[in-house]
Image (cartoon, rainbow, N blue to C red):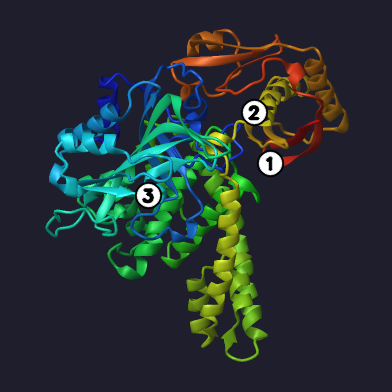
Amino acid sequence: MNIKDTYIKFFEEKGHKYIPSSGVIPENDPTSLFITAGMQPLVPYLLGEKHPEGTRLVDVQKCVRTSDLDEIGDTTHHTFFEMLGNWSLGDYFKKESITWSFELLTKYFNIPKERLAVTVFKGEGNIPRDEESATIWKGLGISEQRISYLGKEDNFWTVGGVGPCGPDTEIFYWRSDEPVPEKHDPEDERWVEIWNNVFMQYYIDEEGNVTELSQKNVDTGMGVERITAVLEGKDDNYKTSIWKEVIEKIEEVSGKSYDDEKYTKAMRIIADHIRAIVIISGDDAGCKPSNTDQGYVLRRMIRRTIRYAKMLDIDINSDWDKCLAEIIIRDYSKYYHELERNKDTILEVLSSEKTKFNRTLEKGLREFSKITKNLNGDTINKDLAFKLYDTYGFPIELTEELAKEEGLKIDIDGFYEKFKEHQEKSRTAAAGKFKGGLAGDGIMETKYHTATHLLNAALKQVIGKDVHQKGSNITSERMRFDFSCDHKLTDEEKKRTEDLVNKWISEGLDVTHVEMTKEAALASGAECMFIEKYPDIVTVYSIGDISKELCGGPHVNNTKELGHFKIKKEESSSAGVRRIKAILE
């Protein structure tokens, strides 16, 4: 059974329209480096904007989470993962959502209801207990003892203190050969969450007052990797059909066995990272390895993959990485056509970064040799061990191995103290990248979003028609815009671009939008680099007669609302991509 196909077909038969996955790198979204959840690309529609495909949607969304990168290597964590989602935008609500989830799990995925349990919101403060969901579950045959009432931390969805929010109900599966207990124990890890149905029902204002939303939405999420492991009876995700061929290829090129515990973790990291690398570098946003943002994450994963390949004695200069990448491209191109289209780019990214890192690795080995020669005593201190990790990409295991050969010790405890400090800083930074969610569409964000369209149009006039947007990042204080360009902009080009945007702002051009088919949008001259990622019906935003783009919003009504546009900086983002940072005054 193909889980993704079964899921999509089931909800299509329930009146849902299948929409293609958004790119893994957010468009005009300041809140994260990557799409981290299925709901992220649908934010405008969850807030009330009309979706061109209607009120019932189903998708498989590409997601990347990097805050737990150092935890990759266990049985369940993944950098890239896929989220199955079905959505109601002011259409059906709890009864249909819960009933259909139960039907799909028990009748199509053939999970016995006796192995299921659920949690619902117990109610707190001025938000009542979710008896409606509990009653629906009881009506479907879930016993009262298998329904747990939990608090806000577990069963309430919110983006912070203010905004849309609501209870959720989570579905759990008993993953153990032990007899299924009569009563659900939320603390028992043998109960594994497989699906989450969020009901956006309320709005909390600044004073904490709770009101019912006029448009109530349903947002569900089920991880492909987890449900696959459940249905295939595996307690290790890497032993499922998803990873089978990749793991076998790693075993072949390394001559090692996955079942040998000395090598299991390294193989998981290589398998996980190579898949994420393919997805990120194959995305139409054109992400390339660099020292900042998404490019830094991509570079770090490639280098980490190479480090662990060396630990498995894989010949780094062979085409092992290309072989693994080609398996991923083949398996995922059915859903993400851009992978096949961008195949040459993916393989070039891997090849070029491997060459660069091999040089870095050699420098690291020389640095290790220097450290050991100048060492006072027989212990490599925490600072030196961490320098090898942070600057030269040496995992502590590699440093330990080298030290052992030289008869030296390492301050392991001290290293992990520094490592935790570093990890905490990384997590804090990552958390700062995902503050907004549904709250990230304020007045200034909307203005900056509209300004990106003007900047894109201006660059086409100043630089040439081959300029295309490659990504953007917007906050309430500034905009950042990446675009294809093979040279550093001259001062004259920057001034002409800035003047052109301000001219259009001063002209008070109306911002309008219409819905049409993809084909009609292209025929009308709308700007769009990769039409495949858009649904059959699209929204086209026009600014006077100077800009026409496929986009999801939000936008101002007239350019006079924007203020004065000023370019603060122009710099390289990655090979063939430049970056402009600008503000509205």
Q: Earlier in the sequence, mark 1 or mark 3?
A: 3
**Residue 575 position within the rendered picture, expressed as x and y whole percent measured from the top left:** 66, 40
**Disc 1 target residue:** 573
Above/below status of 260 relative to 64: below
Question: How many numbered circles does the render carry?
Answer: 3
Identify the image quadrant of residue 268: bottom left
- Residue 1 seen in render: no
Query: Is there CB contact under 8 Å for labels 2 and 1?
Result: no
**Disc 2 target residue:** 469
**Residue 354 position within the rendered picture, expressed as x and y whole percent measured from the top left:** 55, 54
Q: Residues within 10 Å of mark 1 (few under 14, many from 20)?
A: many
Q: Secondary structure at mark 2?
A: strand
Q: Which mark is residue 341?
A: none
Identify the image quadrant of residue 457: top right
Q: Amino acid at mark 2?
A: Gln
Q: Residues within 10 Å of mark 2 (few under 14, many from 20)?
A: many
**Residue at (22%, 36%) from the top-left corner?**
135
Q: Secondary structure at mark 1?
A: strand
Q: Quote the CA–CA distance across marks 2 and 1.
A: 12 Å
Q: Amino acid at mark 3?
A: Gly
Task: Tell me the quadrant of the picture where the C terminus can be found.
Answer: top right
**Residue at (42%, 56%) from the top-left corner?**
270
Q: Quote the CA–CA distance across marks 3 and 2.
A: 44 Å
**Disc 3 target residue:** 151
